[in-house]
Image (cartoon, rainbow, N blue to C red):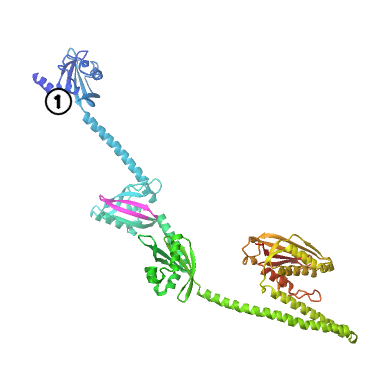
Amino acid sequence: MEFLATLFHYAPTPMAVFQGEDRRIQLANPAWCQCWNVRVAPVEGLLLTDVLTAGQAALYTQLLDSVGVAGPSETTRTITVTVERDGELEERYLRVVTTLTPSLSPVCVGTIITDITETVQAQQRADRLAREQEVHRWMMREALDNSPVAIVVAGSVRDERTAELIDFEYRLANRETNRLSSLPEGEELVGRRMLSTFPGDIDSGVFDQFKAVVETGEPLAIETHYQHGSIDKWFYIRVVKHSDGFVQTTLDITPVKEAEAAIEQQADLLRSILDNSQTAISLHNAIRDPVTRQVIDFKTVLANKRARESWGDRVEQYMNQTLLTLRPEVAGTPEFDRYMQVVDSGEPAQFDHGFGSRMYSINVARAGDGIVLSSVDITRDRQYQRELEQINAELRRSNEGLQAFAYIASHDLQEPLRKITAFSSILTSQYADQLDANGQMIITRMQLAAERMSALIRDLLAYARIGNQHTSFSAVDLTQLVRDLLDDMEITIQTAGATVKVEPLPQLWGDPVQLRQLMQNLLSNALKFKRDDRPPVVRISSEQIPVSQLPATLLASVRATPAYWLIHVADNGIGVSPEYYERIFEVFQRLHGRNQYSGTGIGLAIVRKVAEQHGGLVVVKSEPNVGSTFSIYLPVIE
């Protein structure tokens, strides 16, 4: 018994025995006192409330009461208690075994306590770590499945007899891998083998490359085009060895390759356009001083076919040396200064420059930190220009000679005509009684021919003067000009029984004498080519139109003015058929015989020439037996 008491006393396990209904302490070893931080000694015969805190005593009493006479003789409970250690409270986990000995009187209850705090805390740490690892696994899976890069882990499949690597089996694959694999809906890559899933990897050599990674340990990075079945894509693949297999990351670069192909196609098109251009085009990067950042030279980086051809045997030098190395004499010249100004200001420049026996028109534009030179060989154009200038000078001399001849001819031709008219008048007046009817008729015809010849000479001179005279344009009030003209033609208008209606007309910029010729010829034609069954009616009106409404024949030579005047001279005469619209404006063109209508056939030619001299145009619209409308386009006064 003494041995058992000693063993009880020195046992490291907290043990205590309680007796009676009030659960007084009968025995308690030092380990029990230390467990509950009991400082009262001795404790035998004391109540739990005498040695424990109220909370601890209540908990302990509840444990002791859990074993009753009618209940189980032994219970095991795990409790959590707060114990003060070294002035600090700490939470401990205790496993309490409570034993009832109903054979004794009074009844005794014993407790054996095991401190399982470290075990519980270790289990809690393990549970927490397991939860964290689960979260990490979930996060990793989410990251993998939401990655735009296909990631796959595969293990080697080897021949059982020779251990040769004959295939790979996929053990992990993210969502992007399944998408790129074009597997049927609901199926995954995991568990499949490479060569049965992607048979194209054999012909493309991909399998052999992957096999080399596993056997040598050297990583692999390639761009490959895979085409099999419905898959036709470009991939960037990186493979590294992992255990007896590999980890593969794959990026679908098909859009990039397609964009590169489109860019290359555009580049080829641009190169084709540039190389087939007749303009020499070259790109030159600026070379700057490292300290001052001033442009000190230029280096050619690109040139089209025309530019390279123009450089001839020196093309390699132009492409590999700087401008001032090839042409040191350019430094400090206006040519080099223009290049620098374009780079610094961004404003383009254009100038003509001679190289050897050739002349070029050069356009300079900034491109990045450099310039683009566009040069066109204008040597032949300059030759043509000099030839044209020489021809124009000869034409001017010829015109001056013709003008002088015209004035001389007008006097020399008019003088014999005047004599013919005068002598025929003398014959008619003084020798009429000596001439028979046939003689009188001959003289009359001679006088009419002389008059027609005189009118023809006057009209030809008027036509020749238009454009040859150095006229001084001024503002012309067309309304007043027409009124003055009508006053001068009053007898002619009355004789024809005509009505002339004039609406308000604009002010024009032009030669008043020529404009009067134009209006007089149009009005005279309207009175001359009248119908016999009704009196002539002439209406003169005007309107302003935008440039967009001009005839196509006038648009090519249109002046820099926002609008044009359109002047109409309309009559109700005999009219003109459409096939004669152009013919009536030519010199000496007549649609009727002289016995029907008088005239020289020059009047409308003068009208057209005056209109053109003033930067305009004249057109006609007519209907036989209804009338004609002549429309003159003239620029609005500036």
Q: Please check the rendered image and state whether residue 242 is part of the magenta-colored stretch, yes or no.
A: yes
The residue to which callout 1 is attached is 12
Mark 1 crowd level (few <14, some 14–19, many ≥20, 10 Å Cα)? some
**Is residue 484 shown left or right of residue 73?**
right
Tell me the residue at 43%/65% (across/down): 283
State the image coordinates of residue 499 (x, y, percent, origin top left): 81, 63
Tell me the residue at 40%/57% (across/down): 257
State the image coordinates of residue 239 (x, y, percent, origin top left): 30, 53
Amino acid type, callout 1:
Pro
Specify the quadrant that holds the C terminus. bottom right
Q: Which residues are magenta?
A: 235-253
Specify the quadrant that holds the N terminus. top left
Can see residue 576? no
Most foreground residue, 412 or 612: 412
**Is residue 36 shown left or right of residue 424?**
left
Most foreground residue, 6 or 568: 568
State the image coordinates of residue 467 (x, y, percent, origin top left): 67, 73
- Considering the whole magenta stretch, tell me its main secondary structure: strand
Taking the view exactly as shown, the residue that stands out farthest to the right is 433
The image quadrant of residue 38 is: top left
Q: Please tell me whether residue 551 is drawn above or below residue 466 in the rendered image.
A: above
